Each structure stands twice: as C-alpha cells, then as structure tokens.
Image: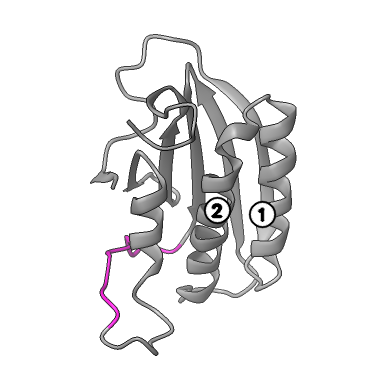
Amino acid sequence: MSTLTSRAPFSGFPRTTELLGSLVLRSDPSSARLAREFTKVALSAGERGEVAASLVPVVSELVTNSVVHRTGPFSASIHLRLLTCGTTVRLEVHDDEPALPAPRTATSPNDESGRGLHIVAALTTRWGCFRTNTDKCVWCEIDAGARSTSGERS
C-alpha cells in the first residue's frame, strides 16, 4: 500500500525528469475513457508499458473523481501529465477545484463511493495532493524499480 504525502513533484530527485505526455480534458464523464487511452499510448511510447496495468485504473479513478467532485463551472478543464524520473512514473491530475481529496470508507458493500483513493493507494508506490497558485494537483507515483519481475512490489 502506498503512502499519502503532500510533497510537490519529484522533490529531492537529482535526475532529469522527462515528460511522457500531457492532455487537457473537459470536465465530462467521457474524459475518464480518453485519459485511459492516452495513458496506455503515452506509457507504451515512453517504453513504460510495464506500469500500465496499475496506472490505467488509477488515472480512470482520479479523472472520474475530478469530474464527479466539481463544484465550479462544468466546462472547466482537467490537465493530465505523465512524467518519468529514473524508474519512477508519475501521474498528475490538475483541476481548479479547491478542496483536496481525502480518503473515505464505504459504509456498505453497495456504496458507489468511498473506495477510489484506497484503490489509488493499493496500486501505487506513493500518492498525494497539493495546491498551487492556480489549481490543485492529485498525483501518484509507481516505482517500476521496486517491482519484481512478476510485477509485484518488493
């Protein structure tokens, strides 16, 4: 299970950070599907396909959260970025919603919410959120170097 932190991107990383891709999405339910497809293509093109099985459901969850929990104008955009630094792949989802996400717990097996950030924590090495002067970022990282050849984290 990953840890929640509010640190900014790749703090303390001495290596070069590479942008695998970025995408601007509408705050619309169809955006999760587009984000999944973008993530698969960007990871494959960046030769990081080994993390796709974990990162694709995570990007879907974070983009869906951004759409569902909007309180501002529905037409506002969501900015998605995929970066790599060494063996770490980082996903960032930016939106202008001021509230930072907090994990909740589903109260019954039939609840439709309360599991998303737990899924993010289970599938990533680290995750967190922070505010900038203009938006909020929810991010996660998967350290491919911390996984064994079977794909499990060590």
- Dot 2: element: helix
Q: In this view, does 110 lie above or below 22?
A: below
The type of residue carrying mark 2 is Val
Q: Residue 25: horizontal and vertical position, in percent?
A: 68, 57
Of label 2 and label 1, which has the lower sequence position?
A: 1
Q: How many badges with numbers are in the image?
A: 2
Cα–Cα gap, marks 2 and 1: 7 Å
Q: Residue 122: horizontal and vertical position, in percent?
A: 35, 52
Q: Mark 1 points at which residue?
A: 35
Q: What stretch is highlighted in magenta?
A: 97-106
Prevailing secondary structure of the magenta residues: loop
Q: Nearer the viewer, residue 29 or 107?
A: 107
Task: Specify the label residue 103 is tagged with.
Answer: none
Q: Is residue 23 above or below residue 65?
A: above
Q: Which of 99 and 154 is in front in this view?
A: 154
Residue appearing at x 54%, y 67% in the figure: 64
- Dot 1: element: helix
Q: Residue 61: horizontal and vertical position, in percent?
A: 51, 62
- Say if the magenta span includes residue 103: yes
The type of residue carrying mark 1 is Ala
Would residue 25 be found to the left or right of residue 154 on screen?
right
Residue appearing at x 49%, y 27% in the figure: 149
Q: Mark 2 points at which residue?
A: 59
